[in-house]
Amino acid sequence: MEEKIRVGLIGAGRAGMIHARNMACRVQGAQVVCVSDAEESNARSAAQEFGCEYAADYRTLLERSDIDAVIIAVPTKYHRRIVVEAAGYKKHIFCEKPMAMNVRECEDMIRAAEQNHVILQIGFMRRFDESFRRAKEIVETGSIGEVVMVKSLTHGPSTPHEWMYDIAKSNGPLAEVNSHDIDTLRWLTGAEVLSVYALAGNFRCGKVREDYPDFYDSVLMSVRMDNGMIGCIDGAQGVEYGYDARVDIMGTKGLITIGDLKGKSTITYTKSGGFQGDVVKSWMDLFSEAYIREDQSFIQSILENRAPDVSGWDGMMAVDVVRAGNESIRTGNIVWLNGKQGKG
Ligand SMILES: NC(=O)c1ccc[n+]([C@@H]2O[C@H](COP(=O)([O-])OP(=O)(O)OC[C@H]3O[C@@H](n4cnc5c(N)ncnc54)[C@H](O)[C@@H]3O)[C@@H](O)[C@H]2O)c1
């Protein structure tokens, strides 16, 4: 009989339900056995969907000996505590991005996973997207020569949640939106970030300007990698026009582009000279296949007893770049990273 990894979900919100649905129906070798959410009604309705048990307190889930692995998809400020406790219960861990609030928390999480010999994978699903993987393969063939510049853009349609306005508590859009772009730059250049310079502004969320003067809804960050390559990260929230995720990879002999706001669109042209088509609405649609492959890869790494495809080190490096970016916005200076470059 096929061996199944028994999965528990902690946090049955937007991201958590994507993973749990994948684990229940689309991922080979996995089954969902329990769901936990601080809002008991969320946990109950998710459990009904999966025909499994539920708990309001995540510790009840962690104490169960019939759970091999957990998906942690609660707000970022709780990641450290729950990951460290889950590792103590010897559960393999998939933790959503951003990994944590700061590097110290990430170090605690990595140490807990190592000491308890469990897998810790961080949720950078773009690495599993077909177009991103293809781009990485093309880079590795050398057909665009040496990569010299990577520009990665993410614009989200919706206005930020209330808790995001306080940058000290949320780390802002650089964390919530652009963690993916930071990881993309590291992954595609094979290098670590050496220094950043970021400019930001609040152009759409005028009503919170007085209460949260530090909040920004738009950011541009120039990046120097430790191998000399350069990059640019462009982020925005509340853009309304759609979900926009694009990358340009410029090499000495060519260019690769990833993504298109039109998605798999049908475009209609009319006599009046206008044209109309579809726009990608949400990350859930754009990356639905990537989430399935990401979840499959997590289960596979447990079954094969191998390192995960995206590690705690990858999560921690992105958190450190977010810190540097926010410091640059605050001070107006170029910020150098703390000699943390190197491979983990
Ligand atoms: N990889 C991605 O593209 C992606 C996309 C969206 C969100 N995320 C990340 O996933 C995490 C969750 O975000 P979301 O958008 O799903 O949030 P959400 O608000 O939709 O869901 C979070 C859920 O966690 C529950 N919760 C809160 N505290 C809890 C606790 N202590 N124990 C158990 N449950 C608790 C809430 O009741 C809620 O149901 C965040 O870190 C976010 O950055 C990643």
Image: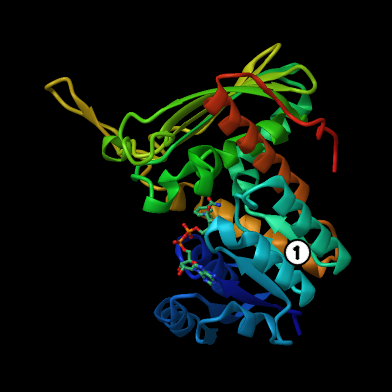
Q: Which residue shows up at 64% across the image and 23% down it?
A: 196
Amino acid type assigned to the residue bearing label 1 in the image: Gln
Residue 244 picture location, percent across and down: 43, 36
Q: Is residue 22 visible?
A: yes
Q: Quadrant of the C terminus?
A: top right
Tell me: residue 62, above or below residue 276: below
Residue 51 picture location, percent across and down: 50, 86
Q: Which residue shows up at 75% across the image and 16% down it?
A: 145
Q: Using the image as rendered, state which of residue 185 and residue 329 is in the foreground.
A: 329
Which residue is denoted by mark 1 in the rendering? 300
Q: Is residue 92 visible?
A: no
Q: Using the image as rendered, state which of residue 55 and residue 334 is in the foreground.
A: 334
Q: Quadrant of the N terminus?
A: bottom right
- On the rendered structure, is 43 left or right of 226? left
Residue 253 picture location, percent across and down: 69, 12
Q: Using the image as rendered, state which of residue 57 and residue 228 is in the foreground.
A: 57
Q: Using the image as rendered, state which of residue 237 and residue 28 is in the foreground.
A: 237
Q: Which residue shows up at 75% across the image and 59% down it?
A: 109
Tell me: residue 287, above or below residue 203: below
Q: Which residue shows up at 32% across the image and 35% down it?
A: 209
